[in-house]
Image: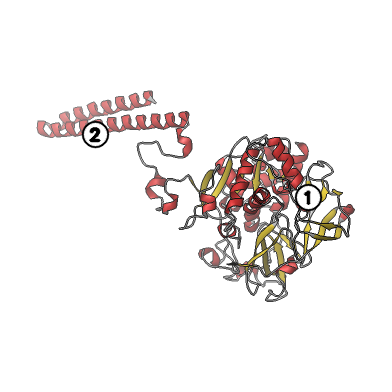
Amino acid sequence: MKNSASKAIITIVSMLTASAAWAQGTTGDSGGSSIVLYSLISVAVLVFFFIVVQVSDSLLVIESKQSGAAASGANFSLFPSWKELFAPRLPEYLQHKPMTILKRGHDILLVGEAAKVVDTGITAKTYAVQPVNFIGISPIPKMLVEEGAEVKAGDPLFQDKIRPEIQWVSPVSGEVIAINRGEKRAITSVVILADKEMKYRKLSSFDLEGGTREELVTYLLDAGAWPLIRQRPFDVMADTDEAPRDIFISTFDTAPLAPDLSFVVEGKEEAFQKGLDVLGKLTTGKVHLGLDGRGKQAPSKAFTEAKGVELHYFHGQHPVGNVGIQIHHTKPIGAGDKVWTLGVQEVIMLGRLFTEGRYNAERIIAVTGAELKEPKYVHTYMGAKVGDLIDGNLSNDHVRLISGDVLSGAKKTAEDFLDFHDDQLTVVEEGDDLTVFGWLLPSLNTPSISKTFPSAFLPKIKFRAETNTHGEKRAFVVTGTYEKVLPMDIHPQDLFKSILVGDFERMEGLGIYELIEEDVALCEFVCVSKQPIQHILREGLDMMREQS
């Protein structure tokens, strides 16, 4: 850097000398030549001063990075950055907060958002725990109960044959009325007919301050709380023998019609903080909270004033609320890393083990969609029967029921049950009709990022969702659309193609460890080739997991 500055100064002096000689040789006017000479000297001094300041500024920035001071995100340069000059004015609650602004993504605004009122009058009659919701366990777990058995909430139902210390417990008290099986006799669900008055298995107390991590793990396993925790890479059951590098929790969801988690956590602040305290004892690293930095109002104080955690604010379009995106921009997953993730309601359940001394599987579910007479939040328990939650609330029968959101949720029938981790039920129109001329028609009810649809120019318009794919599967071509909606430093198109050909080295090098299905759901939505992107990714993750 010093050599470059010296060369620049020598060049300036040479130019100055040559210009002065030219001026004296051509004008013959000593006054005119003096003005030219002094002007060039002034320019040279200014350029020299500018070079010195730039060199000093660069050295200051380098020193701040080497000392680790720049890790906080502060700008140690003498000059403001372009982002600081042209960034929009932030609300008061975001001033001087660690903030990540993502430019890529896409919000899909749908009609049918749940009104922020909890209906406590809706109660499901039956509930289920479904082994198929958990990746990496034996498809035929060891049953600990039989049909007809009476259980309390928190009583063990079955355990994993591979890791028998992990067991699943009943979310409610009542009678086990069915143990359903699928292909190769794999157990698909254990169904419980709930009592009108809930009874709980009483748990022993645990000294969180005095107990060791190993004792805490044993306590959580016995309480049946271990399935609440998910591990990346692969989105599998958490390892009981190895502490995670870090634990991540996203406190907001940007998927279409997703529940407002600041509303959900109201009245449960104590349990949420206790859950964070528990998680802090389970990791050798940090517990990271991803907070919503998009609104004018601050998120719930349960999130902004959480103790013992590291807060990170995020601003952008979907999938900015996905915990995988937040991990990537906070502390990416490398080869050999293991991190844990939980949802807000899982953290609350974890905390209730210690504040209430019982396995309390209560859930606030957002029942959403334009095909409902009244989209709303309902109070129920984990794994509730889908049909019971929408009984008498459908505006028509030609609908699709989805456990989760429209991008990454699972198709259900009225006789099925919400998946274990889901806190949203979406009802949309079944799109089984044929569209004449397809994309040639100027439809305003087709959400798309393609400029062939007028809706692409109306980012604030809300759509009435339906399931028509508007095209069939076709050649897997390079379009660049994935990169527009996936705010991660990876090459998704190359990654998906490397999965299809089974290239393990390229899969690892292209960042497969950082992804699960929900992270690429938006890629599937914008895919002009109509490829099953989420299914392709899961195949790749399973291949890599088998090799690890």
The vertical placement of 433 against 173, above or below, is below
Q: Is residue 532 visible?
A: yes
The residue pinned by badge 2 equals 43
Q: Element under label 1? A: strand
Q: Is residue 305 left or right of residue 394?
A: left
The vertical placement of 392 against 221, above or below, is below
Per the rendering, the mark at residue 238 is: none
Q: Quadrant of the C terminus?
A: top right
Q: Is residue 455 left or right of residue 231?
A: left
> Looking at the image, which residue is at 74% across and 51% down?
202
Q: CA distance from mark 2 to mark 1?
A: 77 Å
Judge by depth and name the residue closer to the eye, 337 or 144.
Answer: 144
The residue pinned by badge 1 equals 168
Tell me which label, 2 or 1, sits earlier in the chain.
2
Local crowd size for mark 1, using a 10 Å CA cut-off: few (<14), some (14–19), many (≥20): many
Label pair 2/1, CB-CB below 8 angstroms? no
